[in-house]
Amino acid sequence: MRAKAVSTTNGPVTGAEQNGIRVFRGVPYATARRFAKAVPPLAWTEPLSCTDFGTYAPQPGHLDHALEESCLSLNIWAPAADRPLPVLFFVHGGAFVTGGGADYDGAFLAAHGSAVIVTINYRLGPLGFLQLHRHGLAEASNLALQDTLAALDWVRANIANFGGDSDAITLAGQSAGASMVIALATLPQAKGKFIRALALSAPGRNIMRAEHADDVARRVIDELELSRDPGMIASVPLQNLFAAVEQVGRRLADETEQGTLFGPVLDGMVIPREPRDVFADGMLRDIPLWLGSCRDEMVMFLKSTPPAAMIRTTERQLRTSFGDAGWERLLSCYRATARPDEDPYEALLSDAFWHRPMADLARLHAAAGGAVWLSRFDHRPSLRPFLSQGPTHGADNACLWAHLPDFIDRPILKRKGGPMTPGDVEVAARFQADVLRFVTAGRPEVADVWPQFAPGHEPLALFDQPSRVVSLKDGARSLVWTELLAQSGTPAVQPIAKSAAVSA
């Protein structure tokens, strides 16, 4: 059934009504020329039908019919209510090169959480992250992050007309989207526009240094043979542009320590400071923060062909920090304490690249007076690729967006959903309830069940069967890390501005 038209700052939109939820898909929030900053779309007067997801952001597998200027849209699921509802503003992941809001159907969360759910598209790959402004080829940097900020501004200006509370927005994201959320939360332009933040599986190295981003841009220009006329990059066919990026990525994986192409960039303008420094300074102490990861994050990347560049990059950085003897000591400890089904090498890399950086950020926020909760998703969903890879990267995300008792299809990533087991339903229901409680009440669980993270008291919530809370400091592995960090003179909470961002 068609929903009534809703007014927006650009023009009226109509959606559909499904089981008491009003759904608006593909609502334009901005438009942008290639390598230009997003601007508001042209206004319209007749109601715009918003019943289908908008155009995917150009990405591998979706280039033939991609429309660059029309990919900046968002989707809204709004339950009926007699009061303005809190808003979950979700930024998708996909290694900064794939994905889109269409992979996340928010109808189930909206129906069960008394919250308005918003998912967005933003520019991906070279269109959103190739830093050309220092080459004089773009008017701004961090275009994808600016797209996300434009979407947030649109939601702030319009969500009340959809039943949402513009003063109760929670920023949320997974993987690359979590990196975007952490960066976005610290921007001066975002101050006062959200009240909470949720980051799931944010990689340890969230911010790319400007010098590396400049090197990537130069390499792409050279690969396209445009060094004599680099301005032509604005009109290169998408297929050629993305093919050049792929070639540059393969070389970078072998030739540089970063081994990655894209991510938010510490440019001194859009991102003026390293986000972790902003958290440490207490600038966000009034923002409740939930940081989560999956137990076996690195399995997916170890099993990729070839293994992801972050694998050898992480090992190399550990050897540099602790020496070969320190690396062997760490690996020996993980072997001695491994579960029967655990790969010690994978567990060590997961801790180094994913879990420990999240704990470090939690420590920074807590020490500055902020409320923060830390979690790990240990349940293996009965869905590919988790059936063979365990609770690897994205396991929590699959359960968060499930329509119990079924996992949903992911059309952009071409992943099928399917029926859930009773165990899946139990863990997913708990996870969804905690997320919705965080969005609506500012804390994921009652205090005596899952206390917030605090200096000297570091609880870690494990989503599994049964779900439980453990101490992050317990165990031989934590002791070895602490001793090696002390011996190397490396601070327990390490700045990461000089490392490149990697995500998926």
Image: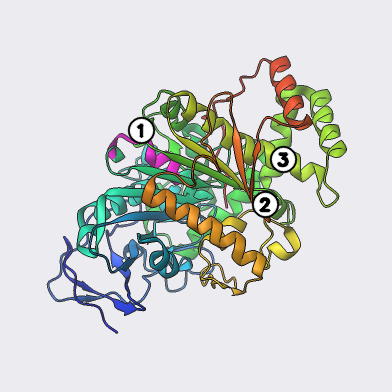
Identify the secondary structure beneath mark 1.
loop
Q: Residue furthest front?
A: 448
Residue highlighted by disc 2: 378
**Residue 379 horizontal side relative to residue 248, left or right:** right
Amino acid type of the residue tagged 3 in the rendering: Leu
**Residue 155 horizontal side relative to residue 262, left or right:** left
Q: Is residue 185 magenta?
A: yes
Where is residue 242? Give x, y as percent: 51, 59
Asked if one can make out residue 132 in the rendered structure from this viewpoint, the answer is no
Q: Earlier in the sequence, mark 1 or mark 2?
A: 1
Query: In the rendered image, which quarter contains the N terminus?
Result: bottom left
Above or below, 298 relative to 10 = above
Residue highlighted by disc 1: 286
Q: Is residue 10 magenta?
A: no
Where is residue 377? Give x, y as percent: 63, 51
Above or below, 409 relative to 381 = below
